Amino acid sequence: MQAALRRRFGGARWALRVPEGAPRPRCLGPGSAPAPRCWSCGSRLPGAEGLPHFCPGCRALQPPGPRPDLFRLMDCERSFRVDAQQLQRRFRSLQRALHPDRFGRRPPKEQHYSQQHSSLINKAYQTLLNPLSRGLYLLELNGVEPAQETDCDADSAFLMEIMEINEKLAEPKNEDILEEIETLIKVKQEELTKEVTAAFERDDLQEAKKLLAKMKYFSNLEDKLKNKKIPP
């Protein structure tokens, strides 16, 4: 049978040929994806993943990325140390450019994207401005489980201090005692912030996690104190 086929086709080798001028398929490497394109005009977009940007062709606002890096968005180094003034300048600059009020006469899709960007910028600013949320976000970026208050359960002296402050907050309202507690919490949070900074700078993520768990306790006490000071 094989000999008959060879005689019939003259032993020629057959192969698929691509016509001249036809586009050749591109081989995409593992995990690679086609370049993003503008939702409005289809133009190829620059590689600025996660950053707010406009189409270079039609100037349409593009949607935010699915998981933007908040440090990159706010033009900050990925570090626990943050320049609060620089962060505020970046926040104001982004809000001026992307606030929904600027897109009132644009297509509905752009209006929606501006709202998404504005919400994301607010979230990024608040997250990076506050030491506790900034530290928790850094842990998340480094693949460390979020800090829980139970992470410092072994520190009996610390837990006793928290319990004593809670007992004072449970007593009838006394302005002098509340002011004393407020000062104490502020001092403790400043001390812990310095310790967390040092832990991150020596790349001791587990120690940073324990310290952030303590900061969570004091953050909860701050909330209780604010509620206590609200007039009945």
Image (cartoon, rainbow, N blue to C red):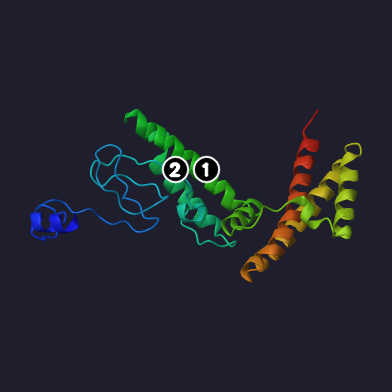
Q: Is there any visible trace of residue 190 in the rendered image?
A: no
Left or right position of 50 against 167: left
**For residue 220, which quarter of the picture?**
top right
- Where residue 51 appears, as percent x and y from the top left, is 41, 50
**Residue at disc 1, secondary structure:** helix
Dot 2, crowdedness within 10 Å: few (<14), some or many (≥20)? some
Please tell me which of labels 1 and 2 falls first in the chain.
2
x, y (%) of residue 38? Answer: 29, 42
Going by the numbered disc 1, the residue's amino acid type is Asn
Pick whichever, 186 or 135, lies toward us: 135
Vertically, is 223 above or below 108? below
Quadrant where the N terminus sits is bottom left
For this rendering, which residue is in front, 174 or 187?
187
What is the secondary structure assignment of the residue under circle 2? Answer: helix
Spatial CA distance of label 1 from label 2 is 9 Å
Tell me the amino acid under the disc marked 2: Gln
Q: Residue at x 77, y 57 (%)?
A: 188
Q: Which mark, by number, is residue 37? A: none
Q: Which mark is residue 122?
A: 1
**Can you tell which quarter of the image residue 139 is in?**
bottom right
x, y percentage for residue 230? 77, 33
Query: Closer to the camera, 12 or 147?
Result: 12
Percent coordinates x, y for residue 123 in the rendering: 54, 44
Q: Which residue is mark 2?
A: 95
Question: Residue placed at 10% from the left, 60% from the top?
Answer: 12
The crowding category of the residue bearing disc 1, from other C-alpha atoms within 10 Å (few below 14, some 14 to 19, many at least 20), is few
Q: Is residue 201 visible in the rendered structure shown here?
A: yes
